[in-house]
Image (tube, rainbow, N blue to C red):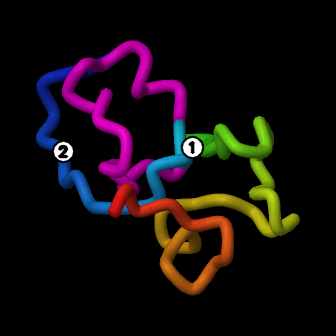
């Protein structure tokens, strides 16, 4: 794994998680993710699944304020 590659962290739902958050401390910031991976699997901590509580797949580009389960921390 190359932890020296630059990240492009973008705001997303606080409930969105992925495995790299637990092995690369640069990515261990809830509510910020680097969506530039074609193989990364995202999951929701509310549903504990790759589908959110609303039954729709979770991904940084899909988990926004338009979803009722979205959590911004505000």
CB atoms of marks 1 and 2 within 8 Å: no
Residue range highlighted in magenta: 18-39
| Residue 69 percent coordinates (x, y) | 66, 66
Q: Quadrant of the N terminus?
A: top left
Q: Which residue is mark 1?
A: 39
Give the answer, above or below, for where 23 lies relative to 57: above
Distance between the alpha carbons at the discs numbered 1 and 2: 15 Å
How many numbered circles does the render carry?
2
* Category of crowding for the residue at label 2, using alpha-carbon neighbours closer than 10 angstroms: few (below 14), some (14–19), many (at least 20): few
| Residue 46 percent coordinates (x, y) | 70, 44
Residue 35 belongs to the span the image colors magenta:
yes
Q: Quadrant of the C terminus?
A: bottom left
Q: Quadrant of residue 45?
A: top right
Residue 49 is labelled as: none
| Residue 7 percent coordinates (x, y) | 18, 44
The secondary structure type at the circle numbered 1 is: loop
Left or right placement of residue 74 versus residue 2 in this view:
right
Point out the frontmost of discs 1 and 2.
2
Residue 29 belongs to the span the image colors magenta:
yes
Give the answer, above or below, for where 64 lies relative to 59: below
* Category of crowding for the residue at label 1, using alpha-carbon neighbours closer than 10 angstroms: few (below 14), some (14–19), many (at least 20): few
What's the residue at 75%, 63% (across, down)?
57
What's the residue at 23%, 52% (across, down)?
9
The secondary structure type at the circle numbered 2 is: loop
Q: Which residue is mark 2?
A: 7
């Amino acid at each position: 794994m190359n932890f020296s590659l630059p990240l492009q962290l973008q705001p997303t739902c606080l409930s969105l998680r992925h495995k790299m958050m637990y092995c690369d401390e640069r990515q261990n910031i809830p509510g910020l993710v680097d969506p530039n991976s074609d193989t990364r699997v995202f999951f929701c901590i509310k549903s504990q699944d790759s589908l959110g509580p609303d039954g729709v797949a979770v991904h940084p580009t899909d988990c926004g304020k338009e979803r009722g389960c979205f959590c911004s921390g505000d």
